[in-house]
Amino acid sequence: MKLLLDNKDYSIILFGKIIYIKVFGFQTLEEIAPLTNSLNKFSKKYEGEEISVYCDLSELILSEYTTALEVNKTIQNMVKHVNVKHMALLFINSYSSYKYEFTKHFYFKDLKFPIEAFISKKDALAWLKEKGDDINDLSLFLTD
């Protein structure tokens, strides 16, 4: 486990070959700077490596589309440097389908790797395991 960022808005932790990203609340363009900086540093440090992504958006409050598009630019830059195999997205609330559509069209626009949305941690972890990822450390971390 390697902590890359942990503040009131984001947690980014590397568990072997899985990067865990959790987003809290609503962010403005200024507030996404720590996220974009951390992901850019990660991209350079792990250039050429194959990774999977577990992205927990269960506590995300949707941002303005301009902020979402800026996050998308950061993710597009990340995939130029690291080989992202796939991404599990976690949504846990009554607005899951709306939130998924918004994130798909703004945050995760034009990405060329499989993205699957889940409403349970267990299902998201099972999908990553099915894809061949070692989920042991991440599972321990996510255990309630």
Image (cartoon, helix red, strand yellow):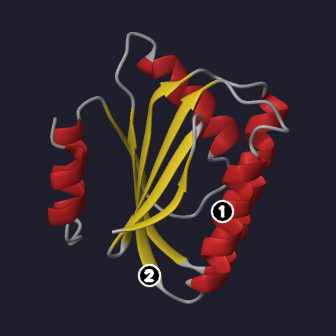
Q: Nearer the viewer, residue 108 or 19?
A: 19
Mark 2, secondary structure of its residue: strand
The residues tagged by marks 1 and 2 sit, at their Cα atoms, a distance apart of 18 Å
In the rendered image, residue 45, in percent from the top left (x then y), is placed at 61, 84
67 relative position to 41: left or right: right
- Which residue position holds label 1? 38
- The image quarter in which residue 102 lies: top right
In the rendered image, residue 82, in percent from the top left (x then y), is placed at 57, 79
Mark 1, secondary structure of its residue: helix
Could you tell me which residue is drawn at 62 percent across and 47 percent down?
Answer: 108
Could you tell me which residue is drawn at 68 percent across and 73 percent down?
Answer: 41
- Which residue position holds label 2? 50
**Quadrant where the N terminus lies?**
bottom left
Q: Nearer the viewer, residue 1 or 27?
A: 1
Could you tell me which residue is drawn at 23 percent across and 39 percent down?
Answer: 121
77 relative position to 9: left or right: right
